[in-house]
Structures are given as C-alpha cells and as structure tokens.
Image (cartoon, rainbow, N blue to C red):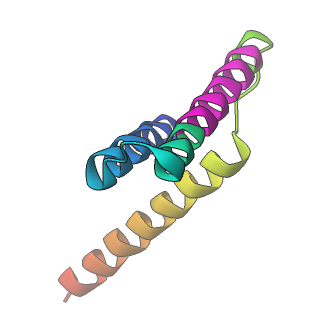
Amino acid sequence: MQAIVLDVLLIFPDLLERGFNPRGGIGLDLLMSLDSTVFLFLLVCLIYGSSSCIIGQLPRLPIVADAADRQLLCKGKLILNNLRQEDP
C-alpha cells in the first residue's frame, strides 16, 4: 500500500505543471523546487526501504505509512458499513 501512495505522490508535480504551465519567473522556480523535493523524498524512501529489506525488517515509511493506514482504515469502515446494511 505504501508503494501506491508513493506512486500517487509522483503524479502531483506533473499535474501542477500541466495545470499552471509556468514558463518562467517564480512559478517555474517553485515548480522546479517541488520536483526536486519530491525526487529527494522518493530517493530517501528508496534507500530506507531497500536497507530495511536487506537487514530483514519491514520498512515503514513515516509519512507514507500513515497515509496508507488511513486509506485502509477508511476502506475497511466502508466495507463494514456495506456489510451491515446488507445483513437483514
């Protein structure tokens, strides 16, 4: 689930670039900074996850794992509510 959250994170800079399409100035500088920040965050996640797997531990990325847990919790609640409504 953490991989899905990281994959979604990769989409945001592209969406901003397509939506605003800055050609220069401070908008382009902000977009380049966002791209660099996302790349650096993903690189750190890759290094942390790989090294955790090498030493035999389950990698739990701090920000990403919390977001993945929230999604699973919301989906679990939704499924439970649907099951409760179906039971007579």
Horizontal side, residue 63 vs residue 22: left or right: right
Residue 6 coordinates in the image, percent (x, y): 50, 38
Q: Which residue lies at the image location 44% right of the left edge and 69% below the top edge?
A: 74
Question: x, y (%) of residue 49?
Answer: 68, 24
61 shown above or below 52: below
The furthest residue to the right: 55
Q: Is residue 70 above or below residue 87?
A: above
Q: Quadrant of residue 37?
A: top right
Q: Is residue 55 left or right of residue 15?
A: right
**Magenta highlight on residue 41:** yes
- Indicate the quadrant containing the C terminus: top left, top right, bottom left or bottom right: bottom left
Residue 25 % position (x, y): 49, 47
Q: Is residue 33 left or right of residue 57?
A: left
Magenta residues, start to end = 35-51
The image shows residue 41, relative to residue 69, as above or below, that is above
Relative placement, left or right, of 80 versus 35 is left
| Quadrant position of residue 84 | bottom left
Magenta stretch contains residue 52: no
Dominant SS in magenta = helix
Is residue 50 depicted above or below 8 in this figure?
Answer: above
- Counting every numbered tag in the picture gives 0
In the image, what residue occupies the spot 47% across and 60% down? Answer: 71
Query: What residue do we see at 76% from left, 21% from top?
Result: 52
